[in-house]
Image (cartoon, helix red, strand yellow):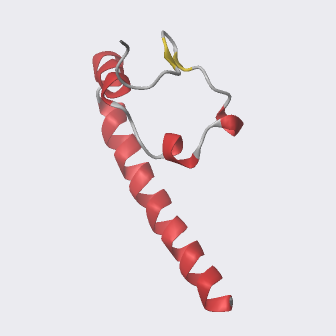
């Protein structure tokens, strides 16, 4: 039985970026992280920082949305 993401292929995610659930834009599964670290280890730090910023912005967006409701 396959573990991890069913959509992870030899070249990364096989889903169209516009079709991916939000979690896919902010979570790196262990298989994908291992592949990234193998080919470009410095990218993981960049991705983690980008995800941190996206999380902060998303939190701001929700706070403003809920404040306006």
What quarter of the picture does the N terminus occupy?
A: top left
What quarter of the picture does the C terminus occupy?
A: bottom right
Q: Position of residue 40 (x, y in %)?
A: 34, 22
Residue displayed at 51% across by 40% down = 24
- Picture quarter containing residue 13? top right
Residue displayed at 52% across by 67% down = 57
Q: Position of residue 47 (x, y in %)?
A: 40, 42
Question: Which of these two is toward me, 24 or 36?
Answer: 24
Question: As displayed, is residue 56 above or below residue 63?
Answer: above
Q: For the view shown, which residue lies furthest in the front direction?
A: 1
- Picture quarter containing residue 52? bottom left
Residue displayed at 34% across by 18% down = 35
Question: Which of these two is toward me, 45 or 55?
Answer: 55
Q: Position of residue 65 (x, y in %)?
A: 64, 80
Question: As displayed, is residue 45 above or below residue 36?
Answer: below
Side (left or right) of 41 relative to 7: left
Q: Position of residue 6 (x, y in %)?
A: 48, 21
Question: As displayed, is residue 49 above or below residue 32?
Answer: below
Side (left or right) of 38 relative to 59: left
Side (left or right) of 59 relative to 49: right
Residue displayed at 39% across by 36% down = 28
Question: As displayed, is residue 17 above or below residue 6?
Answer: below
Question: How many circles with numbers are drawn on the protein?
Answer: 0
Question: Which of these two is toward me, 36 or 23?
Answer: 23
């Amino acid at each position: 039985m396959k573990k991890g993401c069913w959509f992870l292929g030899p070249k990364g995610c096989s889903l169209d970026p516009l079709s991916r659930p939000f979690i896919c834009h902010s979570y790196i599964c262990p298989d994908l992280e291992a592949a990234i670290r193998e080919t470009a280890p410095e990218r993981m730090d960049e991705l983690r920082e980008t995800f941190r910023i996206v999380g902060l912005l998303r939190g701001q967006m929700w706070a403003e949305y809920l404040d306006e409701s």
